[in-house]
Amino acid sequence: MRYWFGLLLMQMLVLPPTLYAQSSAGLISIPSTHDVATTESKLKAALQSKGMQIFAQIDHAAAAKQIKQTLHPTRLIIFGNPKIGTKLMQCDQRMGIELPLKMLIYEDETGKVWLSYANTQVFAQRYRLEACSGVLEKVSRALTGFAQSATE
């Protein structure tokens, strides 16, 4: 019980209150003050400045266009750091399904741009990560920092 309370407290301290209003389904969504391309560029710069490896970039709107469909701009950035991911998988190897980490940048039907990513609290609930709570806290802080750098 103390473990879960600690994680909840950590989330409350790390995440700005504006994020809570847009947190649902295990995702944290932050409004961006930029368009999709600029948000993506700023995210990549923030990731690279912290030594993250960008494994893949997916342009969902471009894929939709290939099948003659339309989709608002939607881009997925897949990234990580094997030093951190390995530690999490050593606690529970099933974490490999969640890794590498992902951030989705998209424009909604009103034209507002958002950046969404997985709430690490869900990982703590889903997997046996008690021994990795410190690592998970660092991941949570890093994700928050990357999101803020990309959206402000």
Image: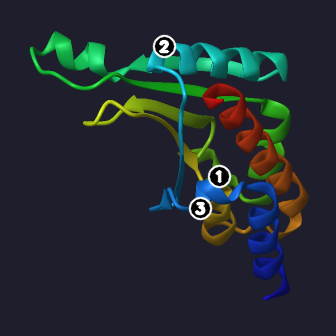
Residue at 80 percent across and 47 percent down: it is: 141
User: How busy is the neighbourhood of tag 1: few (under 14 within 10 Å), some, or many (20 plus)?
Assistant: many
- The three-letter amino acid code for the residue at tag 1 is Met
Q: Position of residue 58 (x, y in %)?
A: 43, 19
Badge 2, how many Cα within 10 Å: few under 14, some, many 20+? some
Please name the residue shown 57% across and 27% down the image.
78
Task: State the separation of the CA atoms marked 3 and 2.
Answer: 25 Å
* Residue annotated with mark 2: 37
- Please give the residue where the numbered disc 1 appears in the rendered image: 95
Q: Which mark is residue 4?
A: none
Q: Quadrant of the N terminus?
A: bottom right
Tell me the distance, in whole angstroms, between the alpha carbons under discs 3 and 1: 24 Å
The tag earlier along the polypeptide, 3 or 2, is 3
Query: Does 94 appear above or below 3?
Result: above
Identify the residue under disc 3. Answer: 20
At a point 50% along the width and 17% down the height, the residue shown is 57
Residue nearest the viewer, comparing 70 with 32: 32
Which residue is at the front of the view, 130 or 52?
A: 52
How far apart are labels 1 and 2 at the CA level? 30 Å
Depth check, mark 3 against mark 1: the one in front is: 3
